[in-house]
Image (tube, rainbow, N blue to C red):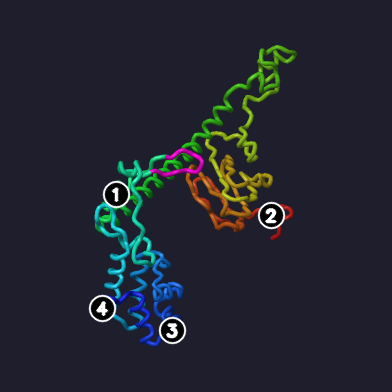
Amino acid sequence: MEPEETLDLYLSGLRRAARLSIEQVCDRTKIQPRFVLALEAGAYSEVPSNTHLRAFSLAMAKACGGDEERAAALVRRLLSATAPVAAEGAPRGFDTQAPAPGPAQAPPRGPSPSQASGGSVLATAGGPQRPAVPASAMAAASARLRSLPLGVLLSLLALAGSLSYAAAWSVEHWRQRSVAALLEAQPAAATGRAQAPASPAAAGLPADGTGPAASDARDPAAAGVGAAAAPSELEQASGAAPAATGDLGLTLRARRACWLVLSIDGKRLPTVTMLDGDKLNWTVSQRAVLLAGNVGALRVWWQGDNDGYLGELGQRANAIVFERGKQPRFDKSAALALPKGIPE
């Protein structure tokens, strides 16, 4: 290698000697034309980084039939001549910005008081300055990471992924158990409400028990008021009656808008429209049949079990049967008639 030989002259000479055009070199190396022209013109600052500078130079030398080792030596000489030296005395690495053309660079300015103490200061527009993380600490952390073997880094990443998956699985399992416990407790709560006597307010009487119907209110049978309390808001919204002893819970939660029709124990309920995030519960004594316009939008809990989604988003499903002691299933013989205005 001649002492006066430079990287730009070497690469341009190789291309001309091989009788290759800029387009042909780009086809062989997959390098953009503007970078090939920048390397041959010595405009190294147009290259994104020193890593790109070295990779592009070796690729061009190989594509033009030149010596890759010679090109690498020219790159090293270029970087050692133009790159500044760090405070520790080590030359700049290949991951920094490519050097700008010119024989010399301006001398660095003197350190500020904050930099002299081992840190740096970040200025904010229109506000006070705040101290930043010392460069020496960041450099030390980066050096420690680079010193770790690749196998150790991969093992740490795999461990972090496993811990994240385990935490997500634990949260989902706990949530499903909570929902199952809630569904199991609902029949008992409904039974307790049915056994409780009606309050004066529920019977439409003053709170102090006075009034023309006070004597009848003290006797529920004489007043004609049943002993069962009013159904909950959730049961009113779903059209279900209060749960009796031994009844089962059917719960649906929507992740998209969906209309549905339910037939519970032989009684067809009005059409219900659920929106994203809605959750409704019905009590079933023996059997329920579901017709859904978007079955993939409904997550199903039946008999305290999370059965997930019973179809794909946008899919209509009819005759999904929920029967005591059995898993949800499709039974064409139990198909429900479509609501008015819904095409077949």
Q: In this rendered view, identify the residue nearer to me: 242 or 90.
A: 90
Earlier along the polypeptide chain: callout 4 or callout 1? Answer: 4
Q: Is residue 287 left or right of residue 203?
A: left
Which one is in front in this view, the residue at disc 3 or the one at disc 4? 4
* Residue 136 drawn above or below residue 63: above
Which one is in front in this view, the residue at disc 3 or the one at disc 1? 3
Which one is in front in this view, the residue at disc 1 or the one at disc 2? 1
* Residue 228 drawn above or below residue 152: above
Q: Residue 252 at x, y = what percent?
A: 56, 45
Earlier along the polypeptide chain: callout 3 or callout 1? Answer: 3
Residue position for label 1: 141
Earlier along the polypeptide chain: callout 2 or callout 4? Answer: 4
Q: Where is the C terminus found, in terms of image quarters?
A: bottom right
The circle on residue 2 is: 4
Q: Which residues are magenta?
A: 121-129
Q: In this rendered view, identify the residue nearer to me: 259 or 324.
A: 259
Residue position for label 2: 338
Q: Amino acid at mark 2?
A: Leu
Earlier along the polypeptide chain: callout 3 or callout 4? Answer: 4
Q: Residue 210 at x, y = what percent?
A: 70, 12
Q: Amino acid at mark 4?
A: Glu
> How busy is the neighbourhood of tag 4: few (under 14 within 10 Å), some, or many (20 plus)?
few
Residue drawn at the location 27% of the way across and 72% of the way down: 73
| Disc 3 element | loop
Residue position for label 3: 21
Q: In this rendered view, identify the residue nearer to me: 335 or 202.
A: 202
| Disc 2 element | loop
